[in-house]
Image: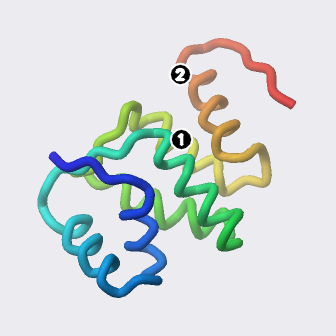
């Protein structure tokens, strides 16, 4: 298993650094198990949507396509994939969506502004 940080996944999607894109593509499209911290996903979503201005639905679709592969492991895959699915809607940011998913799983209430 290999741990990936946000920059590796960002270089894979953005291909803004040719050398790093090739390395990230080899790892991400390889056969090794990959671990991504939930907080890294938050960072990826923020950078793609806020810094690069990429449409939330497109970000959601691309991340879901990648992260639904069995090789990808997370602290809580259900929360990550749920948050990514909610991202398509014009509601709270990804962190808020992550909390909404946790609320549904734990069957508890939440409060956010």
Q: Is residue 20 above or below residue 28?
A: below
Count the marks: how many? 2
Q: Is residue 67 above or below residue 55?
A: above
Relative horizontal placement of residue 37, taking residue 50 as reference (left or right) = left
Q: Which residue is mark 2?
A: 105
Q: Which residue is mark 1?
A: 82
Relative horizontal placement of residue 2, taking residue 60 as reference (left or right) = left
At label 2, counting other C-alpha atoms closer than 10 Å, the crowd grade (few under 14, some 14-19, many 20 or more) is few
Which x, y percent locates residue 12? 38, 73
1 and 2 marks in contact (CB < 8 Å):
yes
What is the quadrant of the C terminus in the image? Answer: top right
What label does residue 1 carry, if any?
Answer: none
| Viewer-nearest residue: 12 or 60 | 12
Which x, y percent locates residue 40? 47, 47
Which x, y percent locates residue 59? 57, 65
Image point 63% across, 56% down: which residue? 46
Relative horizontal placement of residue 37, taking residue 113 as reference (left or right) = left
Q: Quadrant of residue 67?
A: bottom left
In the rendered structure, which disc, 1 or 2, sits on the residue that comes first in sequence? 1
Q: Is residue 62 above or below residue 73?
A: below
Image point 68% across, 67% down: which residue? 51
At label 1, counting other C-alpha atoms closer than 10 Å, the crowd grade (few under 14, some 14-19, many 20 or more) is some
């Amino acid at each position: 298993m290999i741990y990936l940080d946000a920059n590796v996944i960002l270089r894979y999607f953005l291909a803004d650094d040719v050398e790093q894109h090739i390395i990230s593509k080899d790892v991400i499209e390889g056969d090794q198990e990959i671990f991504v911290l939930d907080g890294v996903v938050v960072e990826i979503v923020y950078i793609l949507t806020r810094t690069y201005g990429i449409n939330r639905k497109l970000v959601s679709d691309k991340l879901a396509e990648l992260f639904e592969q069995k090789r990808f492991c997370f602290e809580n895959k259900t929360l990550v994939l749920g948050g990514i699915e909610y991202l398509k809607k014009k509601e709270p940011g990804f962190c808020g969506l992550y909390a909404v998913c946790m609320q549904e799983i734990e069957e508890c209430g939440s409060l956010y502004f």
